[in-house]
Amino acid sequence: MATVTVTYDQEVGAAYVTVRELPAVRTIELVPDRLMLDVGEDERPVGFEIIGLDVQSLRTLLHTVEEALSEIESETESDLLTLA
């Protein structure tokens, strides 16, 4: 599974989540001044920025992402076992 990294700038309350280690070629503003999506040449997400997060909100976000990734990983393993 790909590694997801999160960086946080506490001074401005912004988190950047990298989902693929590729350069962004375009940024899409999904929620004005709050949520930006960076996409690569293939138009698939490479990362996104969330603006206006306090530390508690960041912790909640990280927990949610961790749970989602665990669920995806479990489903993938289950699918592989089914195919075997």
Image (cartoon, rainbow, N blue to C red):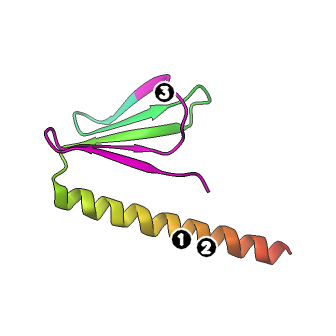
Residue 31 placement: quadrant: top left
Secondary structure under badge 1?
A: helix
Query: In which quadrant of the rendered image does the C terminus lie?
Result: bottom right
Of residue 13 and residue 34, the one placed in the foreground of this image is: 13
Cα–Cα span, label 2 and label 1: 5 Å
Query: In which quadrant of the rendered image does the N terminus lie?
Result: bottom right
How far across and how far down the image is residue 16, in percent? Answer: 34, 42
Residue at figure coordinates x 22%, y 34% from the top left? 33
Residue at figure coordinates x 78%, y 76% from the top left? 81
The number of callouts visible is 3
Q: Is residue 44 left or right of residue 34?
A: right
Residue 71 has which mark? 1
- Density class for disc 2 (Cα within 10 Å; few <14, some 14-19, many ≥20) is few
- Density class for disc 3 (Cα within 10 Å; few <14, some 14-19, many ≥20) is some
* Amino acid type, mark 3: Ala
Provide the residue span drawn in magenta: 1-27
Cα–Cα span, label 2 and label 3: 29 Å
* Amino acid type, mark 1: Glu
Residue placed under numbered mark 2 in the picture: 74
Residue placed under numbered mark 3 in the picture: 24
Secondary structure under badge 2?
A: helix
How far across and how far down the image is residue 4, in percent? Answer: 48, 51
Mark toward the start of the polypeptide (2 vs 3): 3
Q: Is residue 53 left or right of residue 28?
A: left
Q: Are marks 2 and 3 in contact (CB under 8 Å)?
A: no
* Amino acid type, mark 2: Ser
Position of 51 relative to 38 (above/below) = below
How far across and how far down the image is residue 57, in percent? Answer: 21, 58
Q: Are marks 2 and 1 in contact (CB under 8 Å)?
A: yes
